[in-house]
Image: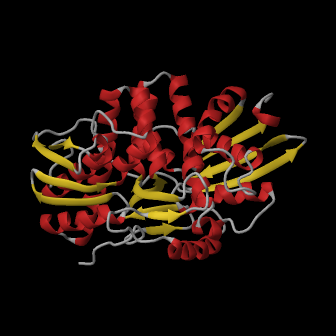
Amino acid sequence: MNLPKGSLDYTDYVPEYGVLKVFDTFVTYHCNVFNHYFAESTLITLGNDLGIRTLYEASEFAHFRLFRNLKDRLGLSAEELLEFGKHYYKSRGMGVLEIKGINDIFLIASTSAHTYIKVSRGFFEFPTCNVERGFIAGLLEAALDVPPGYIKVEEDKCIGMGDPICKMRVIITREKNPRFRDVSYDGVPLNKRPGKEERVRKMREISKAFPEPDESGVLAIPSRFEDIKQVWIVQLPTEYYAYTNMVIAENALEEVAKYTLTAAGYNCVLFTYISLAHSPVGDVVIGDVREPDEYFKRLAEIGNYLGFGIFEVADIRNSGGRVSGSINLFNFYENNYLMAMGRSARSYFLAGATLAFINSVFWRRVYALPSMGTLIDWLRDFDELYNGVRYQVDFNDSENSQRIDFEFGEKKVGIT
């Protein structure tokens, strides 16, 4: 049995749709700094109890489905699946996982816990590895042919709290989580977009720029962006993000959910796209472009290779200090999930991404300089942007697309 070493092993790129799949499971790349803020905003919005449960369950459900598909596809025994799972964990940039026994499960390195410490500049009072707990639970449940909820994984020690390792404890509940649904994507329309050959060519070049994880399980791409230096990339099932956003939308007030989901798109572009734009990946996708309108289009294109779907900048006008235009996003992972659940698409990711694209290109001018202020400063821009901008987001379920029409005034204010 071939074991994965790098995150592109067993990962299929589907250029017509701009999606990534592992054993028929949609997956996507995000940087760990974004994942930190995504988890943190989930806890703030839902509260610690529901927030932690949601992050854990989202990872458990998604990885259970992934490893069940893998086990069925390759015909693996439980022991073989667990061995594969340890290598898969490291290859996705999540750290190093050791499974010595049912209650001897350790994370020798947890990239998310280390990111928590780095971003927060200190230790946490509670364990931080909710995605990792869900990963382990989903892997064990798939290996044992039991449903999600049958096993519960708790974290007793955590690097994020100052412990030298993360130690997990397994509880056998023999229950089935009623919130788990076996989602089918068979009826979800995926919209084919032109440009397949060019995307295939660029993905071949990107695969050469993607390093394999180091011995600590860090998948780091060197970035020339001064505030990052290295982009710590992790590949997770798209259902982790989509399920979490769905719970936020269901449990928060509508305006709070809209704010949180728009902020997620904004943060994603800041921490993932801007960092990668100044890396070998950006060199392939963007090249040496100095015109802001063209850079805007190339920056959006990075998402085509991360598993987000396909961004198309339909129109962009930059005149007299005002920036306006339209962006379409096809086959976005959150909308795929919502439609698979029999619900209408409603993601505000594109709105937040557009705010960040415009802020970074036209006001911060990242195409000309590697850094203008810190990314924390950019986060502080969000409230000014969000409260000073009006935009229209339209969803088309039959075409699996969403469109945003925008018009932004000079210095981020005075928008009509």
**Above or below 178: residue 340:** below
Quadrant placement of the N terminus: bottom left
Q: Quadrant of residue 67?
A: bottom left
Residue 11 at x, y = what percent? 41, 68
Residue 204 showing in the rendered view: yes
Q: Is residue 410 placed above or below 315 in the rendered structure?
A: above
| Residue 365 in picture, x, y percent from top left | 75, 50
Q: Decide if residue 332 is on the left or right side of residue 373.
A: left
- In the image, 48 versus 146, the foreground residue is 48
Residue pictured at 9% horizontal, 43% vertical: 172
Q: Residue 62 location, x and y as percent?
A: 33, 50
Q: Residue at x 34, y 47 (%)?
A: 113
Residue 181 visible from this viewpoint:
no
Q: Nearer the viewer, residue 20 or 292?
A: 292
Q: Residue at x 30, y 65 (%)?
A: 88
Instruction: State left or right for residue 400 relative to residue 117.
Output: right
Q: Quadrant of residue 381?
A: top right
Image quarter of the C terminus: top right
Q: Which is more toward the observer, 372 or 142?
A: 372
Q: Is residue 142 left or right of residue 124?
A: left
